[in-house]
Amino acid sequence: MSIDFYWRLPTHGCHGSLRHSAYDRGDWSPLDPHNIAPGLDRHGADDGYRYVDHLAEIAKAAESVGFIGGLLPSFPGTDDPWVISSLLARETRSFRFMIAFQPGFLNPVHAARMAASLQRATGGRTVFNIITGGGGPSQLWWGDSFSHDDRYGRTTEFLDVFKGVWQGEGFAYDGRFYQVVDGGLSPLLAAEELPEIWFSGSSDAALQSAAKHADYYLSWLEPFDQLTDKFARVKERTAALGGQQKCAVRVDLVARATEEEAWRDVRIGFENLSEERRGQARGGATDSVGAARQQALRPSEAKRYDDLIVAPNLWGGFSLLRGGPALGIVGSYEQCAARLDELIARGADAFILAGTPHLEEAYRVGEEVLPLLGRSADVLLQAAE
Amino acid sequence: MTIQVYWQIDAAADPGRSEPGARQNPPTRFRDVRTNAANRYDYYAQIAQAAAQTAFDGVFLRYRAESDDSRTVAAVIARETPRLTLVSEFPAWVGSAVYAAKQAVSFQRLTHERLGWAIAASVDAPSRARDGDHVPEDQLAARTEEFLHVARGVHGTRPFSHAGAHFQVQGGGFEAPLNRVAFPLVFLQGESEEALALSGRSADVHLFAAAPVATLRGLVETLDSLALREGRSVAFGVIQPVLAREFSDEAWQDAQRARLPASAIVGNYADVAERLAALAALGVTHFVLTAPSSLEEAYAIGQHVLPRFRALTESIRAAA
């Protein structure tokens, strides 16, 4: 069985090193001499490069090294995934753009039209990561005042309409949130393939919606036994609801030639943390179940980096070093490959991998880790001794 | 303000061009080596390149429900045309005003502020029901106004809150660096009293449909006084079909073959330039020029009419 490996396109700038928390790629940090995209030219002025120029480098790196595509996250402080994907459509060939997207963002008919247009521009390389929303103040920031369970109801209806108009003309829908009369995409647009739908969300409301519409169920990395149970439950629950769910996991890697070098980078990154950065990692209010599961780890309270080693090659402090999930994999190339193989054995059908800095690590993971997959875990771990 | 001239890209026009699915099948006697890697966006990019190389200031991408989405097309071709302004037309019912603003800001950040927003004229209720939009007819102008108020609000103000009939935001507003770029220039359209009043309150540029000079003069004066009453000023634009040839008789002959509206300006290069300059003399500063065959006509207009037009408007400005 072949497994889809995605990389991540960081839409909120990128750190030049895991050891330092400055976003020195992109304009989220002040324009100073070691910053790039934008950077300073020889006369000390803005050199005219924009962050999308760096994202183009990452996408092309991931594409050339064999990743099927990349996830583009969407938060209040990020640049927009739709816009980035469209800007990069004609500079990439096989790279799939996984656009993180909340149903509240767009009218579903118009969303279908935009998606079909992007499919036409890219030869069918659009993938959707539907985010129903973490809730709380951040939803109101987006102008979305629906409650948690209502939001999943709306997500289901959104996808009913999104897929319905794709069947062509004469589509009607009378839902709680959306009503369409005699709608449908034009034959030109409807001829495109529907984008694959990736779904997140751990609550029951989320799983019901996933069973109906999702191709992949995406989880952050959790301790392996917990994740195994979760995948089994998702597959079982969605099967009972008539869905057929593949499972995917989002994992950050620190892969180095030796395990010692990998932990050294993690240790230095941890020791360089500012109090401000730890404070940010404590996070804000959210009613997301997935986020709550991760926060049980409390990495911001740790005194030493190795307090956060929760299992061999599994470190729970990634959220301190950059935004996103706490857990990730740290180890030699062989160990990283063995852990990914283990996740495949436990039910993972696809991955979104990431490493910092995203450009250089795309090459490293693509060249050093992915080729080792599929060899037996024992052989790999012995080789790592 | 300097005059801006945009060339129209209509995604629904010449639908067979560069469309893999529209190729002749079976082929004629030529050996066809084209692959499906070539697609319709090559053609959009080519029109934009034509406009750039013939010194247009930008392109105007029409909203066409049956064809490619205008904002998607603008972004897809943006990096191949690093100098052009890209004005995308779309209706105010595309979704969240906050998200529309977020996308606009990213576009501005990543393309050196080259986006323009043109809100499409409203359409009848059955057409909107097909798109899942059920706002009553008499609230459409108010919805457009609120859409723009919220989009500009989250861009320019933090924290921004709004509780309106169509949009609600709490504690919103973009942080640095997203708020460092300019909001796109907003183009509104329409000739009705309500449309003009809305533009007086909310438009940066009002685009009139092509019309005789006397009609446009009346509309320009009305809008000017409406805007003044709001303490604002609105720039004037016109969407003008054109057809120009070396000799007038050739232009008129080709005009018979093309589907041109009565309001089109048809003539030799110098005549067309003069007619456009007459509009500039009314105070029109944004010209959206359109022609049925967008790629070829971009060269005819860009190479032969625009230099003459610009020379004429320079002399108007010098005289003023």
Image (cartoon, coloured by chain):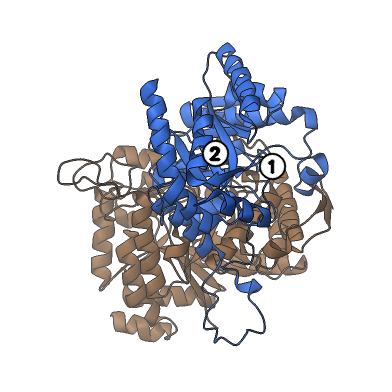
Chain colours: A brown, B blue
Q: Determine whether the residue tagged by mark 2 lies in a helix, strand or loop.
A: strand
Q: Of the numbered discs in the image, which one, if any, rests on residue B49? A: none
Mark 2 near mark 1, Cβ–Cβ under 8 Å? Answer: no
Which amino acid, mark 2?
Trp
**Residue at horizontal 33 percent and vertical 62 percent from the top:** A359
Q: Which residue appears farthest toward the left when viewing the image?
A: A42
Q: Chain of mark 1?
A: B
Q: Is residue A203 visible?
A: no
Nearer to us: label 2 or label 1: 1
- Residues B109 and B124: in front is B124
Q: Please report the residue visible at 30 percent of the width from the left and 41 percent of the height from the top.
A: A29
Q: Which mark is first along the chain, 1 or 2?
A: 2
Res. A69 visible in picture:
yes
Nearest to the observer: residue A63 or residue B227: B227
Kindly identify which residue carries mark 2. B117
Residue B16 image offset from top left, x and y in percent:
63, 67
| Residue that numbered label 1 is attached to | B262
- Measured in 3D between alpha carbons, the distance from the residue under mark 2 to the one under mark 1, in whole angstroms, is 27 Å
Residue A53: name its quadrant: bottom left
